[in-house]
Image: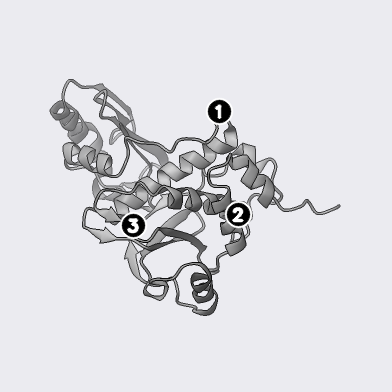
Amino acid sequence: MKFEQYGLDMTRSEPVMVSIDFDTLHLRGNDVEGATVDEQCDSLAQLQAAYDERIAPAMADDRWMDVDRGDAATPVADLGALEAELLACGHDWEQEPVVADEPVEALVTALVTRIRRELNRALGAAEIALEHVVLVVTDGLIKPAVCNPPALAGKDGAELQSVVQSAPDWHHGVPLAFATAHDEALGEPLVSQWPEPDAFGPQSLLAVMLDLVAARIEANPRLRSNVSVPNGLHLLFVFAGDETIDFARRAQARALADQPAAAYFDLCRPPVSPT
């Protein structure tokens, strides 16, 4: 099981990273001078000591920006506690692809894995019954999330659609500290075959991708053990400033959630405008 953290050293304007492999007790990263750290350890205690000496000082005084969360990076105080938390969040399990060795499928399964893990992290260890989660998409991040918006309580199907379309504040509720970058979600296999792949908003390629991600997580939430889903999970992605849902496309995503991802994208791809 591996923990990876990517950032930007604000004092040097240089990319930095941390990789902690708990299975092999291997540490990689960048120290306070920007030099590469590459340490093979014999115990978790030795790994902690190497991390505290070489990695933690590089993050002091908000030197690092965590690019996946859009916030200052903080060092890990207890690697043993981090390992336990990663296990609780499902870092020892990855989404299984519907078909192997298919590039579009690989993009979707990687994002499903990342969204699920980050949702588990944001939900925390307290007991909670989950019904609706709204994740807000901004220019570079999916951040934040809203847990169980009161306007959506008990709503499904036509009732859910009616509230979303008629109540401007339907997505308001208790915030979750969810944050993950989406800049790597769309790879060449999709971008090269999509009209205007860089468009942003509810009808964009990113929105199409996120609806399929939502459908797959809804079908198999696999959330941490303290989270219950008594009446099924509704995972809704909305774009900041245009908090609408394409319910027809969501239905397509749910119908094809267990099919190869390429079939869904073929169905959703807009026609190319004649020149």
Residue 81 visible, this orientation: yes
In three-dimensional space, the C-alpha distance between marks 2 and 3, rounded to whole angstroms, equals: 23 Å
Disc 2 on helix, strand or loop? Answer: helix
Q: In the displayed image of the protein, which residue is found farthest to the right?
A: 275
Q: Earlier in the sequence, mark 2 or mark 3?
A: 3
92 to 245, vertically: above or below: above
Residue 66 visible, this orientation: no
Is residue 126 toward the left or the right of residue 119 in the image?
Answer: left
Q: In the displayed image of the protein, which residue is found farthest to the left?
A: 45
Give the percent coordinates (x, y) of residue 171: 44, 70
Q: Quadrant of residue 16?
A: top left
The residue lying toward the viewer, choosing from 263 and 186, is: 263
Image mark count: 3
Which numbered disc covers residue 229?
3
Kindly identify which residue carries mark 1.
101
In three-dimensional space, the C-alpha distance between marks 1 and 2, rounded to whole angstroms, equals: 24 Å
Kindly identify which residue carries mark 2.
252
Q: Quadrant of residue 35?
A: top left
Disc 3 on helix, strand or loop? Answer: loop
176 to 210, vertically: above or below: below
